C-alpha cells in the first residue's frame, strides 16, 4: 500500500476544496478541485468547471496516485459550489 | 483497505472527528458514483489502454465497475466488468 | 456461576457488518450503509442478469 492509501480520513480531508496537481502512474498528471477522497479506495475525485455551467470530473484511483500537491487553497465560493455538486436535495433548496 | 490507523489510540473526541471526516468523504464519493450511472465514462488504464463505456454500478469495496457498451481498441462489448486495479483514472462530464 | 452455552453466540453477518460500520462511521453509519447497499444491490442484480465478463480477460496490472 502506498503512502497516499495509508493516510487517515483527517489527513485526506485537508485536501478537500483545494486545487491540486496529482501525479499518477505512467506519468499521468491531473489538475482540479478536490471534491473528495474515498476513504475506502483512496480514489481522488477532481472537479473542473467548464463552460455552460458544466463540470468535468476526473477520478484518480488511489493505487495509482504517486503525489498530490496543493496549488490553490481555494475560497468559500468554490467550497459552496463543490458542496452542492451531486447533492440533489440541497441544490433544490439552494434554488429557492 | 480502510484506514484505522488512528483508532484505538486517541480519545473519544478524536475518534468522533475521524468518523465524521470518513462519513463526509465517503458520502461525497458514493454520490459521485450514483451521478455516473447511465453516463459515458472514459477510462485511462495501465499500458496506455483507453476505453469508454456506460457506467452501471460498482461494488462497495470499489474493486469492480460493471459497465455496458464498452468501446475497446479491439471492438465493443455489450456487457463487461472492469477491474479497478487495471484503471489509472476515469473521467466524465456532467 | 454463569452458565456457558455449548453453542457459539448466534451472530448474523449483517450484525457484524453493522458493528464494523459503526466503528468506522459512528452516527453516520446507517446513512452510509443505506447508500452502499443500494449500489451493491444494483451491482449484484446486473451481474446476475447480464453475466458480464472481465475486460481485459487478463489483468493489465499484476
Image: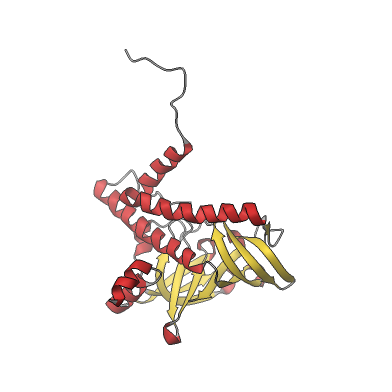
Q: Residue at x 36, y 49 (%)?
A: C29
Image location of residue C62, percent across then percent down: 65, 57
Q: Is residue B10 left or right of residue B79?
A: left
Q: Is residue B23 above or below residue A58?
A: above
Q: Quadrant of the C terminus of chain A?
A: bottom left
Image coordinates of residue B32 in percent, x first then y, are 45, 66
Furthest residue in direction top, as rendered: C1
Camera sees residue C9: yes
Please indicate, yes or no, whether residue B61 appears anywhere in the rendered image.
Answer: no
In this orientation, which residue lies closer to the viewer: C23 or C39?
Answer: C39
Q: Residue at x 40, y 46 (%)?
A: C21
Q: Residue furthest bottom?
A: A51
Residue drawn at x 46%, y 34% as measured from the top left? C12
In the picture, residue A81 is in which quadrant?
bottom left
C1 displayed left or right of A20: left
Residue C7 higher or lower than B18, as above or below? above
Image position of A40 with respect to A95: above or below: above
Label total for image:
0
Amino acid at each position: 500500500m502506498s503512502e497516499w492509501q495509508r493516510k487517515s480520513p483527517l489527513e485526506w480531508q485537508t485536501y478537500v476544496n483545494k486545487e491540486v496537481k496529482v501525479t499518477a502512474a505512467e506519468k499521468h498528471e491531473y489538475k482540479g478541485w478536490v471534491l473528495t477522497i474515498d476513504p475506502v479506495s483512496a480514489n481522488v475525485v477532481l472537479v473542473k468547471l467548464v463552460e455552460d455551467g458544466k463540470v468535468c470530473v476526473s477520478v484518480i484511483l488511489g493505487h495509482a496516485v504517486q503525489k498530490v500537491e496543493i496549488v490553490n487553497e481555494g475560497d468559500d465560493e468554490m467550497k459552496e459550489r463543490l458542496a452542492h455538486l451531486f447533492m440533489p436535495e440541497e441544490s433544490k433548496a439552494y434554488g429557492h | 483497505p480502510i484506514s484505522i490507523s488512528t483508532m484505538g489510540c486517541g480519545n473519544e473526541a478524536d475518534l468522533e472527528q475521524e468518523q465524521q471526516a470518513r462519513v463526509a468523504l465517503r458520502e461525497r464519493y458514493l454520490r459521485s458514483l450514483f451521478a455516473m450511472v447511465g453516463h459515458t465514462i472514459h477510462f485511462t488504464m495501465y499500458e496506455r489502454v483507453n476505453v469508454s463505456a456506460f457506467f452501471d454500478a460498482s461494488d462497495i469495496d470499489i474493486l469492480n465497475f460493471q459497465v455496458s457498451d464498452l468501446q475497446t481498441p479491439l471492438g465493443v462489448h455489450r456487457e463487461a466488468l472492469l477491474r479497478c486495479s487495471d484503471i489509472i483514472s476515469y473521467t466524465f462530464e456532467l | 456461576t454463569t452458565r456457558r452455552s455449548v453453542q457459539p453466540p448466534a451472530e448474523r453477518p449483517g450484525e457484524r457488518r453493522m458493528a464494523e460500520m459503526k466503528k468506522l462511521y459512528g452516527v453516520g453509519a446507517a446513512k452510509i450503509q443505506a447508500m452502499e447497499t443500494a449500489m451493491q444491490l444494483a451491482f449484484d442484480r446486473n451481474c446476475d442478469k447480464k453475466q458480464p465478463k472481465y475486460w481485459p480477460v487478463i489483468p493489465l496490472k499484476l
